Image (cartoon, grey):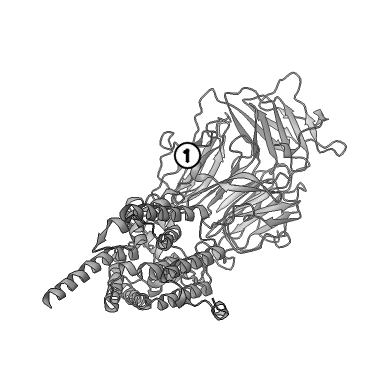
């Protein structure tokens, strides 16, 4: 290795793509926890990470005979550790395990169809809402902290060519919030309030941009982002607290099925 | 919001302090079945949005002092609102609550504001409840504050000169929740206080869980605590308010009564969606009440039942509300313990929002033994607030303190009542007066209240022994006379 190479600063482009997600979410978690103490205990976070890593390794070994890179399960574990709110330990472990298991159980044409954490969270909300909730409060009230998280997050997303998904979703959310405000009579600010919170930071930066569960074309990704926001609006009319998760849960797999159907049809015609 | 009784002028009758979202008011008992209302020139602020207050003697000078906890900012007058920017600026990290106050009593119904000098006004949290107890065994009462929209706080009393906020150091003040009530008790007969703080849990929306802080060690001369509410079974309340630790079945282990329920309005409706939508927002949105959707008669964590958890003494609690007659659905707020029939059973009074007060008569198993103490200070404040009684029985020590206010906006009876299960004898009772005098009652009779007057110290000794009369003829009205004092060497508090 030459001295030039040693002195060259670490560039984002030089990082393996599998490292970007873990680094980003770790940085986000550390900043939020050290600033505001967002975690009840580290042990619950480690429970979630342990569950995702263990489930990933066991299932991957069982299905393929090889060990899996840990980055994906690590991101899912941290996401579950941040998003799940419960005084108990088992919801953290179960959310993590369900998230990872969904990748191996629900597959279509060689790939999983749900963002793992989104799937785990929604299933837990359906099955175990008596025992857990999802992060829905603000991390502190420091505007700069929020701005930095968004800027760093969106910049990173831009570098991995996913910025248009986030931007489309945010614009669609704002438009539908305006519509909701007009229909319900609630203030526009109240309708867009969730977007300024940490739950949406995780949702926008990590869930809807998941490379494995988004469509391969830019146009398709934009359409899906709008549809997620639209479905979320419908859920919000029915006062579903976790409307965005339900929106992605429904739209994500359907969009993959439809895209493949359209591709098949196109291939058949040609 | 609440009222607390204490003899602020040591004249032998009970004075009253009334706190609310408005002007705090002192009512001096004139001793002739009338009260004199003191609202001006008494050293108290004109307007505090107070949710909690305590009588306590922080400097142990024998005169009651006053702690007053602010909720909304004191500039906010909810009856004449001039700005809608009055809500918390965060729902777990709020920094815009009301100031807390500490007033030293002068003994004549007036007070001196020492909040800043004593380090009480270090921040602006939304204090909803408070209690006081000597957590570090130095003889001075420490303050335990349950704060809404943030972390709870422990103020360690540094020899009556100032307070040091030590919540984070003690393991308590890190994870923010919605502190609603604070209560302390010696849960396991070890002579060490545990702290119960109720919070809010709503399945699927907000799962904070209540906190039961148990001392697990010592760090920098203060105990360190660990939250074991989940493992012992008292974590899952609902929208908690008053949580009171008190021995309901006289088995020697304090149990827990938890008042639940916020607003029971139109059945089948729910405000949680609107709440969750806004609380996730940035402070500029949530701080302004005009951004909050109107409730329009919707229920908000309403129609909830209170909980009664019995302490097994072996580390677990069991919820028995339905089995013992505690099934009313109420929007409960404050709960206080009082032995209404003077029979050694701890009855409960539960105050409810827009609903009648409930009084629960406690029917004990007849063979349960007990012992009680009514304390009256002489050097210490006459109400004996802050005094502690430790009874040594059945190879353990049970400890209680006389409170000048605790749980949520309440004050229980000051006479201390200890359940003894089926144990008929108590080896000795140790009374630690706020003055520093320690008094011993050897083999006090059980099944009765002992009225105990604080003795004068002899030769400057802090360790005194009051022997029980040799004929053993203790009655429920017996007063232990200071004349019967003799000195002896006793175990120090650190031996506990």
Element at label 1: strand
- Residue drawn where x is 15% and y is 76% of the image: A266
Compared to A179, does B465 lie above or below? Answer: above
Which residue occupies the foreground of this view, A167 or B41?
Answer: A167
Which residue occupies the foreground of this view, B168 or B96?
Answer: B168
Q: Quadrant of residue B305?
A: top left
Task: Specify the farthest residue to the front.
Answer: A1
Compared to B235, does B275 lie above or below? Answer: below
Q: Specify few, some or many for label 1: CA neighbours under 10 Å numbering under 14, 14-19, or 20 or more.
A: many
Task: Specify the farthest residue to the right.
Answer: B459
Circle 1 chain? B
- Residue B186 place in picture, x, y as percent: 61, 39
Query: Quick check: B222 left or right of A220?
Result: right
Tell me the residue that label 1 is attached to.
B308
Query: Quick check: B212 left or right of B457?
Result: left
Task: Specify the farthest residue to the top.
Answer: B471
- Residue A32 place in picture, x, y as percent: 52, 65
Residue A15 visible from this viewpoint: yes
Query: Quick check: B213 left or right of B383?
Result: left
Compared to B134, does B289 lie above or below? Answer: below
- Residue B81 place in picture, x, y as percent: 51, 69
The N terminus of chain B lies in which quarter of the figure?
bottom right
- Residue B333 place in picture, x, y as percent: 49, 49
Task: Specify the farthest residue to the left.
Answer: A269
């Amino acid at each position: 290795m030459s001295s030039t190479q040693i002195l060259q600063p670490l560039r984002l482009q030089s990082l393996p793509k599998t490292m970007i997600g873990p680094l980003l979410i770790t940085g986000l978690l550390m900043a939020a926890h050290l600033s505001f103490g967002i975690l009840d205990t580290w042990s619950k976070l480690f429970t979630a990470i342990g569950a995702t890593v263990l489930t990933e390794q066991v299932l991957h070994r069982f299905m393929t005979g090889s060990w899996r890179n840990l980055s994906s399960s690590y991101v899912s574990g941290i996401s579950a550790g941040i998003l799940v709110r419960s005084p108990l330990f088992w919801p953290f472990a179960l959310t993590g395990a369900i998230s990872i298991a969904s990748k191996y159980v629900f597959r279509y044409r060689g790939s999983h169809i749900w963002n793992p954490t989104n799937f785990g969270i929604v299933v837990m909300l359906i099955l175990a809402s008596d025992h857990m909730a999802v992060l829905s409060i603000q991390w502190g009230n420091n505007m700069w902290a929020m701005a930095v998280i968004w800027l760093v997050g969106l910049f990173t997303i831009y570098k991995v060519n996913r910025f248009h998904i986030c931007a489309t979703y945010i614009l669609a959310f704002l438009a539908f919030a305006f519509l909701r405000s007009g229909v319900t009579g609630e203030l526009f600010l109240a309708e867009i309030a969730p977007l300024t919170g940490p739950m949406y930071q995780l949702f926008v930066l990590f869930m809807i941009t998941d490379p494995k569960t988004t469509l391969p074309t830019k146009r398709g990704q934009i359409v899906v982002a709008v549809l997620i926001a639209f479905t979320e609006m419908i859920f919000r009319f029915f006062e579903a607290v976790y409307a965005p998760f339900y929106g992605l849960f429904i739209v994500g797999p359907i969009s993959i099925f439809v895209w493949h159907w359209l591709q098949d049809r196109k291939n058949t015609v040609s | 919001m609440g009222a607390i009784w204490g003899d602020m002028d040591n004249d032998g009758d009970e004075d009253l302090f009334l706190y609310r979202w408005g002007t705090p008011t002192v009512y001096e008992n004139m001793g002739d079945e009338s009260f004199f209302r003191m609202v001006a020139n008494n050293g108290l602020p004109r307007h505090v949005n107070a949710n909690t207050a305590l009588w306590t003697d922080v400097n142990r000078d024998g005169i009651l002092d006053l702690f007053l906890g602010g909720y909304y900012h004191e500039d906010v007058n909810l009856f004449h609102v001039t700005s809608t920017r009055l809500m918390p600026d965060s729902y777990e990290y709020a920094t815009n609550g009301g100031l807390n106050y500490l007033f030293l009593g002068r003994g004549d119904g007036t007070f001196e504001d020492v909040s800043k000098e004593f380090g009480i006004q270090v921040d602006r949290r939304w204090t909803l409840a408070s209690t006081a107890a000597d957590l570090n065994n130095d003889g001075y009462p420490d303050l335990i504050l349950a704060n809404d929209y943030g972390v709870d706080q422990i103020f360690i009393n540094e020899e009556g000169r100032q307070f040091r906020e030590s919540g984070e150091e003690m393991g308590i003040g890190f994870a923010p929740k919605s502190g609603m009530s604070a209560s302390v008790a010696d849960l396991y007969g070890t002579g060490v206080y545990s702290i119960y703080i109720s919070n809010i849990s709503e399945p699927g929306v907000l799962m904070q869980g209540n906190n039961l802080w148990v001392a697990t060690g010592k760090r920098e001369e203060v105990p360190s605590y660990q939250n074991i509410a989940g493992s012992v079974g008292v974590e899952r309340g609902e929208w908690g308010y008053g949580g009171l630790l008190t021995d309901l079945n006289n088995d020697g282990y304090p149990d827990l009564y938890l008042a639940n329920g916020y607003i029971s309005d139109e059945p089948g409706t729910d405000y949680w969606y609107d709440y969750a939508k806004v609380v996730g927002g940035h402070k500029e949105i949530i701080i302004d009440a005009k951004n909050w959707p109107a409730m329009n008669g919707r229920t908000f964590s309403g129609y909830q039942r209170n909980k009664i958890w019995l302490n097994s003494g072996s580390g677990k609690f069991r919820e028995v509300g339905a089995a013992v007659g505690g099934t009313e659905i109420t929007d409960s707020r404050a709960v206080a313990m009082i032995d209404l029939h003077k029979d050694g059973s701890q009855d409960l009074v539960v105050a409810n929002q827009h609903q009648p007060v409930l009084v629960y008569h406690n029917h004990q198993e007849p063979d349960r033994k007990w012992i009680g103490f009514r304390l009256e200070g002489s050097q210490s404040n006459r109400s004996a607030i802050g005094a502690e009684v430790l009874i040594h029985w059945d190879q353990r020590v049970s400890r209680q303190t006389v409170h000048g206010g605790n749980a949520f906006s309440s004050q229980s009876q000051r006479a201390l009542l200890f359940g003894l299960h089926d144990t008929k004898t108590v080896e000795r009772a140790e009374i630690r007066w706020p003055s520093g005098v320690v008094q011993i009652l050897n083999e006090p009779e059980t099944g009765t209240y002992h009225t105990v007057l604080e003795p004068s110290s002899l030769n400057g000794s802090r360790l005194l022994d009051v022997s029980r009369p040799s004929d053993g003829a203790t009655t429920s009205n017996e007063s232990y006379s200071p004349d019967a004092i003799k000195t002896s060497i006793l175990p120090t508090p650190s031996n506990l």
